[in-house]
Amino acid sequence: MNKIQKLGCACEKPTSDYTEYRTSELGIDHTNGRYGEVSIQQCKLCQRIWIHYFVEYESFSKSGRWYKGIVSKKDRPNITPENAVEFLESLEWYVYGGSYFESTGTFGQGKVNVDL
């Protein structure tokens, strides 16, 4: 399990409207036809790197959901859109939310729910 220490930075707060990231698109995860949007976000304050996964099923209302977890600099080059879910599930903790959960964000760990 990837052990990531919480530092108390604003980027860790699940419900914050924190926007101080540099974001780059990693690509689309086509596994199981889910078309998950995977991006990398780097906090401008603490410099930590997050992997962000978002999926929404247009034919289902309240299906939008996102997950984000901290990535070490050494693990970052190994993450692809196709293994992003597996990586998030390996973390000690991640943040998730969206209309599917009727949540603006909360902490979680283990299995991520990205399929219909």
Image (cartoon, rainbow, N blue to C red):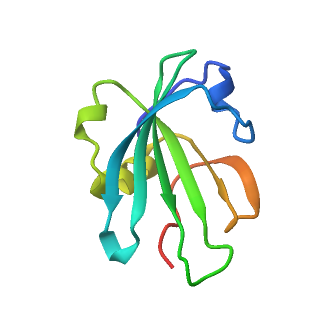
In the rendered image, the residue lying farthest to the bottom is 59
> Could you say where residue 34 lies in the image, as x and y percent from the top left?
40, 72
Q: Which residue is located at x 70 percent, y 47 percent?
A: 106
Q: Quadrant of the N terminus?
A: top left
> Considering only vertical position in the picture, is 111 above or below 2?
below
Question: What is the total number of numbered labels drawn onto the structure image?
Answer: 0
Q: Position of residue 94 (x, y in %)?
A: 56, 43
- Image position of 88 (left or right of 26): right
15 lies above or below 73: below
Residue at image location 54% in from the left, 15% down from the top: 46
Residue lying farthest to the left in this orientation: 78
In this view of the protein, which residue sits in the foreground, 113 or 28? Answer: 28
- Position of 17 compared to 1: left or right? right
User: Residue at image x 47%, y 52%?
Assistant: 53
Q: Position of residue 112 (x, y in %)?
A: 51, 60
| Residue occupying image coordinates x 51% and y 54% | 110
Q: Say whether residue 107 is visible.
A: yes
Give coordinates of residue 38: x percent, y percent.
40, 51
Residue 111 in view here: no
Q: 27 or 13, which is in the foreground?
A: 27
